Image (cartoon, rainbow, N blue to C red):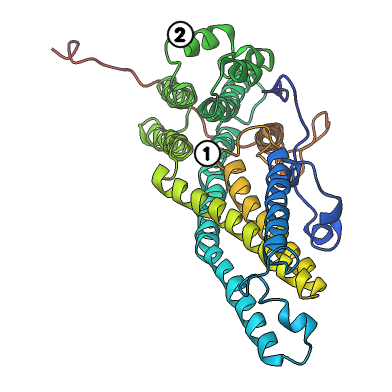
Amino acid sequence: MAIPPTTSYNRQPKGQVIRDSEARLFNFGFLFLLRGTVLQSWFYWTQLASLIGISIVALIISYFYSSPFHCHSKHCAEFHEYRWNQRDFVQVYEDLDLLEIIVSVMTIMLVPEYVASLYLRFTVNIWWTLRFKTLQELMNVASSMAQRAAIYFPGQDSDSLVAKETIMRYGVLSVALFWKDAREIDAWTMDFREMKCVDDLSDLVQGGLLSEAEAHLLQTEYPTVKSQVVWVWLASFWTKLCLDGKLPAPNAKIQGEMLKKCTHASDQIRTMLARLNTQYPSQYGHIVAAWIKVGFFVSACITGYVSAIAIITRYYWYVAVCFAQLIITILFYQGILQVKEHINNPFLDQKCDFPWQLFHARLVRQCVALYEAGSQPPYVVPPGSDGDVPKGMRRKPAQMPPQLPTVQISSTRMK
């Protein structure tokens, strides 16, 4: 039986992560990991540099505004009295208390930071549900049908091989077409659609998952529901096997079970596409982004002002503390926003997206392994063995005898 080769759905393939070594990552591996993370984003660092620039400008303005050499009013020089008069401890305490009040204004970031954390948490939960429940359920249906076929058609005759290959091919094909449907959601330009082969099924034809006639039907008759149509074909194929007497039960029990499984698989596809097409309310996303960006700007201005006062009052170490706090805050919460955006659609070609080649190979090998297990169970003597069959062994795997074909009778013929 031919195994469909792994097909590519990107004309410019990139390496993707299958599984990270978390033990290494949580030790010192994070220091050497750049590609595929938010640290690779140019906007990430451009925004940080801009905000540090704003802080430096605020520092310079605040320094010269508060300097006694450029302003002789009492208000401007209030932070300098104890610099020249070390015995005025009351003034020192008042100045430090004022600085603490100013720094406390940065707590304005706590609310948007908390909301942003929830923002990411909900998205991660959805990402996990897509992978662990809906996508895995879809693959489970394909594997369970292959297991049924391995029992119903254990032989190596042409009819059995065709039946098993068709069931496996349609199951893998549906997953492949879903990947295309998922990429179409974020295909904002024609160049992107062409690069990701969203509308081109020739790669599936070359990979052996589609015939020319099937590809023509999908592109011309069912262009919007390609991944779901395959499950209709598969349910119809099981019905054909039932009517042809290829299944052990002559009634519609097996056909009903297979129809239920096909419907369940289509439901999973519809659920995943609905989730990928559904965004958070724009008002919610706007207020979260706006509050975080405004908080960044306010934090940068406060950092510059407090740093200027720290320089004037010779608390130089506090300048480093302020800028370190600013940098950590910006990098962390901008990273939250970008991670949320990156994992919205995990069926693209970013490094941490779901790798289609892995899912394709895993599903195909599962089906082939099940077919081989059904064709050669432990009680079957190895092929080519001569002589008597040992007690309890058989030369061929057990198979329920096929039933007589079920004749379809229309209501007109009953008259």
Q: CA distance from mark 2 to mark 1?
A: 25 Å
Q: Give, as a three-letter code, the residue at label 2.
A: Thr
In the rendered image of this protein, does residue 307 appear above or below residue 58?
below
Q: Quadrant of the C terminus?
A: top left
Residue at x-position 61% and y-position 37%: 398
Write down the residue under mark 2: 220
Circle 2 or circle 1, nearest the eye: 2
Q: Is residue 124 visible?
A: no
Q: Is residue 243 left or right of residue 7?
A: left
Q: Foreground residue, 266 or 152? A: 266
Quadrant of the image occupied by residue 151: top right
Q: Is residue 177 left or right of residue 30?
A: left
Quadrant of the image occupied by residue 72: bottom right
Write down the residue under mark 1: 138
Residue at x-position 42% and y-position 24%: 232
Q: Are marks 2 and 1 in contact (CB under 8 Å)?
A: no
For marks 2 and 1 on the same chain, the one whose residue lies earlier in the sequence: 1
Q: Give, as a three-letter code, the residue at label 1.
A: Leu
Residue at x-position 60% and y-position 39%: 346
Q: Position of residue 39 (x, y in %)?
A: 75, 46
Q: Position of residue 280 (x, y in %)?
A: 44, 45
Q: How many badges with numbers are in the image?
A: 2
Q: Foreground residue, 20 or 319? A: 319
Q: Residues within 10 Å of mark 2 (few under 14, many from 20)?
A: few
Q: Is residue 18 left or right of residue 73?
A: right
The residue at the far left in this view is 415
Q: Residues within 10 Å of mark 1 (few under 14, many from 20)?
A: many
Quadrant of the image occupied by residue 18: top right
In the rendered image of this protein, does residue 117 appear above or below residue 166?
below
Q: Position of residue 207 (x, y in %)?
A: 69, 17
